[in-house]
Image (spheres, rainbow, N blue to C red):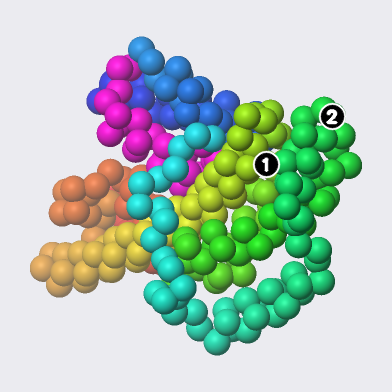
Amino acid sequence: MADRLEFHEKLKGILELAARQNSRITTEEVERYFKEDQLSQEQIELVYEYLMSQKIIVKGYEKENSRKTDDKELKMDADEEAYLKEYLNDLKALKRAKPGEKDMLFGRLASGDTSVKARLTEVYLEEVVEIAKELYHPEIFFGDLVQEGNVNLMLALEGLTEFDNPEKAVLCEIRQGITSLIEEQTEVKKRGQKMVEKVSALDEAITKLTDELGHKVTFEELMVYMDMSEQEIKDIMRLAGEEAEEG
C-alpha cells in the first residue's frame, strides 16, 4: 500500500511538472523523473498513456498502433462528412506550400523570425486533417479532432526548439494532441460507465437488503455487503439519489 501511495504521489508530481510547462513534457524528462523507480519499458509506456489521458503532450512518444484508419475505413456520420467537406473547401482559399518553402520558413523561425508562424500554420492545416483522419475515433466528433490538432499545431510552432527535423517535431505534436484528446474522452466515458454500473449495483444491493432485513439499510450493512468503504458508498449515493441511515 505504501509503495502504491508513493507512486501515486509521483504521478501527481509529474502532472504538476507538465502543467508548469504548458501541459508538455518530454520522454527524457519522464524517464529521468522515474529513474530511481527503475520502471520497465512497459511500465513507462503506461505512464505515458496515463499522462496522455490527462491531456499532457509527451514529446518524443508515439503510441503504438496509433496510425490506424485509412480513407477506406472512415465511417463518418452525415454531420462529420458535411463538416469535412466545408472545412476542406475553406482550406482551398489558402496558398499551397511551394517546393522548399517549408524549409525556408523553418530556417527563418530558427533564426528568430516569429512572423513566419502564421504561414507555417497555414501550410500544415491540411496535414492536421490527414492526421485526424488517420486517428479517427467514432465516439468523438471529427471536427473536435481537427480543432485539437490545430491548437497543438500552433503550440508546437510556439515552443519549437528542435530544428534538425522541425517538421517531424511539429507533426508528432499534432498527433500527440489528437491522441491525447481521444485518450481523455474515452477515459471519461469509461469512468462514467463504471459509475453507472456502481449505481446500478448499489440500487440492487439496497433493494435486496431491504427485502431481506425488513428495514432501511445502514451504511455498515452496505459496506459489508458491497465490500466498499463508507466514503465510496456515499459518493455513489449522491449520484443515485439514495440515502441510508447511519448507525
Note whether residue 148 is visible: no
x and y, in percent, of residue 187 in the image? 41, 55
Residue at the extreme left = 212
**Residue 26 vs residue 127: left or right?**
left
Depth check, front residue: 97 or 174: 97
User: Residue tagged by mark 2?
Assistant: 112
Residue 8, x across and y down, in percent: 38, 29
Q: Is residue 12 visible?
A: yes
Alpha carbon distance from label 2 to label 1? 15 Å
Q: Residues within 10 Å of mark 2 (few under 14, many from 20)?
A: few
Tag of residue 156: 1
The region drawn magenta spans 37-58
Q: Is 204 in the magenta?
A: no
Q: Nearer the viewer, residue 167 or 227?
A: 167
From what the image shows, is residue 69 above or below residue 155?
below
The answer to which of 161 and 43 lies nearer the viewer is 161
Magenta stretch encompasses residue 51: yes
